[in-house]
Amino acid sequence: RIRDMARLLFHELSKRTNSPIYNLLPDIVSQLSQLNLKQEVFREIMLFLLCFIKKDKQNEMLMEKLIQRFPKCTSINQKADLAYCIAQLKVNDKCIKCLNDTFKLYKDALFDEDVLKNFMSVVSKAKKNTKLDTKDALEELEAKFNEHAAAGMENVKASRKAVRAKKRAAKRVARKKEWEESDEEEELSEVEETETGEMEFDEENQPENRRTPSAVAEKAVGKRKSGRSSNRSRRGVRS
């Protein structure tokens, strides 16, 4: 029911003379694209709304407005959505000129198969229109599409390769650091064990006058105890 009411609303808006749908469409496209809707849902909505754009002037201006939004996109999916909307518009000589003049704004997205397919559909649609006098411009545009699509794909592959190489290098550095820390810990442990062994050996073998106070005290206590026990045994014999 909500869907039917929305459709009815847009049908009523299309009857107004100030073209509210045309004025709102660029923002509608951007907002819906940012919602990350399923592709088929987004395209179904836009196909319905774009059918209200019937005047040539509106087609020309809307195409230019949509192309101007390419640099503002934050993902290739948003660019593909824009390209789809452009492909649904009617094509005339001014539209082809617009695509040529603004080529630098969307050329970086042509590596994407979906984006390229939609722009190519504009060219195919234009070729079928016998009224167009822009055959040379169309051929030039098609050649630029193919050229930048191939170059863009190579750049994407190179970029992905660089990212993978960077990750591998980071992992190697991390492993090397772990090994160095492990070696240092082993060396410290060996040094501590060696020092402990040397100290124990020195204490056992050093003369009485050079032994540590604690060692001398322990020995003296032992002698006193031994002396007391021997005295007791003598007393017992006398008695």
Image (spheres, grey):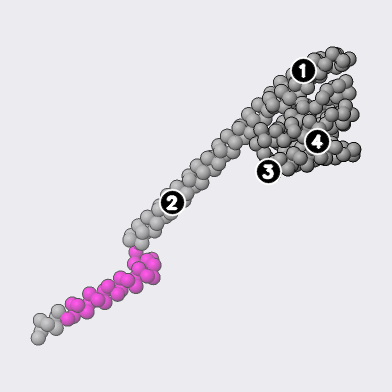
Question: Toward the viewer: 169 or 111?
Answer: 111
Question: Toward the viewer: 194 or 232?
Answer: 194
The location of residue 70, given as percent across then percent down, is 78, 34
Q: Amino acid at mark 1?
A: Ser
The stretch of residues the image draws in magenta is: 206-232
Magenta stretch, main secondary structure class: helix
Q: What is the CA distance from the residue labelled 1 to the residue labelled 3?
A: 38 Å
Q: What is the CA distance from the residue labelled 4 to the residue labelled 3?
A: 33 Å
Q: Is residue 213 rendered magenta in the image?
A: yes
Residue, disc 4:
69
* Horizontal side of residue 127 vs 34, given as left or right: right
Q: Earlier in the sequence, mark 2 or mark 4?
A: 4
Q: What is the CA distance from the residue labelled 3 to the residue labelled 2?
A: 77 Å
Evaluate if marks 1 and 3 touch, with contact meaning CB atoms under 8 Å apart. no
Residue, disc 1:
124
The quadrant of the picture occupied by the C terminus is bottom left
Q: What is the CA distance from the residue labelled 4 to the residue labelled 1?
A: 23 Å
Q: Amino acid at mark 2?
A: Ser
Q: Earlier in the sequence, mark 1 or mark 3?
A: 3
Evaluate if marks 3 and 2 touch, with contact meaning CB atoms under 8 Å apart. no
Q: Residue at x 14, y 83 (%)?
A: 235
Q: What is the CA distance from the residue labelled 1 to the residue labelled 2?
A: 75 Å
Q: Earlier in the sequence, mark 4 or mark 1?
A: 4
Question: Toward the viewer: 161 or 15?
Answer: 15
